[in-house]
Image (spheres, coloured by chain):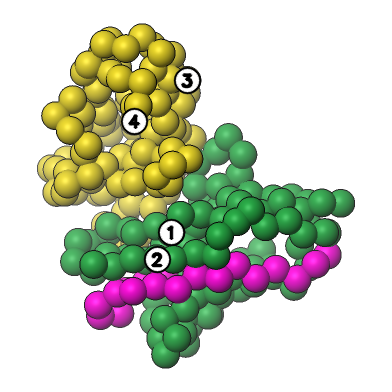
Amino acid sequence: DAGVIQSPRHEVTEMGQEVTLRCKPISGHDYLFWYRQTMMRGLELLIYFNNNVPIDDSGMPEDRFSAKMPNASFSTLKIQPSEPRDSAVYFCASGPDSRETQFFGPGTRLTVL
Amino acid sequence: GNSVTQMEGPVTLSEEAFLTINCTYTATGYPSLFWYVQYPGEGLQLLLKATKADDKGSNKGFEATYRKETTSFHLEKGSVQVSDSAVYFCALSDIQGAQKLVFGQGTRLTINP
């Protein structure tokens, strides 16, 4: 299995631009998670899905952030408009049903200038 | 709510030294407990887990025992190697939300030859 795939691996953009991060979970996993990691705040859960349905988005920082999962093999996290304080590493993770282990992707390092 | 507190880092040791990274938790009920490891430039990987009191998780020479009486899950290794240099995260399953993990702040470990 290829594991969780994220793209792009690095993204540099200017303040005010729209940013879209992509994730392909491991085939057969029913849960998908989006995390943000910064030095100041550590690892934060933004949102997670079960069977493509958003279950808990209480970690999404504000309305500028949105996430979708149109099918079982693809999810996006969008930031519009982006701000310098959004600079972080964003991780996608997936997990199989009825188990608690999560499998993380390599992350997308976002820099907003 | 549920929370995890980890030993503050960074931790620097010499090769072949004994390692302990402390982790304590606050939770209602009986969560599962995890240690994840993050190598430079990569996503988190599950290192070991324990699902009930007195269980011992082990992997790659690392061990941790689920201690309900002290609400702890300390990570230990008898003889560390340079390749163990990484950031280590303690986590618990949030029984209020299926599959949702609560992570500690992470402990950076550096092993010098």
* Residue wearing tag 3: A10
Does B40 appear in magenta?
Answer: no
Classify the position of the N terminus of chain B by image quarter. bottom left
* Residue wearing tag 1: B104
Disc 2 and disc 3 on one polypeptide chain: no
* Residue wearing tag 4: A23
Disc 3 and disc 1 on one polypeptide chain: no
Chain B, hue in figure: green
Type of amino acid at the residue the image marks with label 1: Gly
Type of amino acid at the residue the image marks with label 4: Cys
Q: In front: B29, or A75?
A: B29
Q: Chain of mark 4?
A: A
Disc ID at residue B4: 2
Mark 3 vs mark 4, CA separation in Å: 13 Å
Mark 2 vs mark 4, CA separation in Å: 27 Å
Q: Chain of mark 2?
A: B
Type of amino acid at the residue the image marks with label 2: Val
Q: Chain of mark 3?
A: A
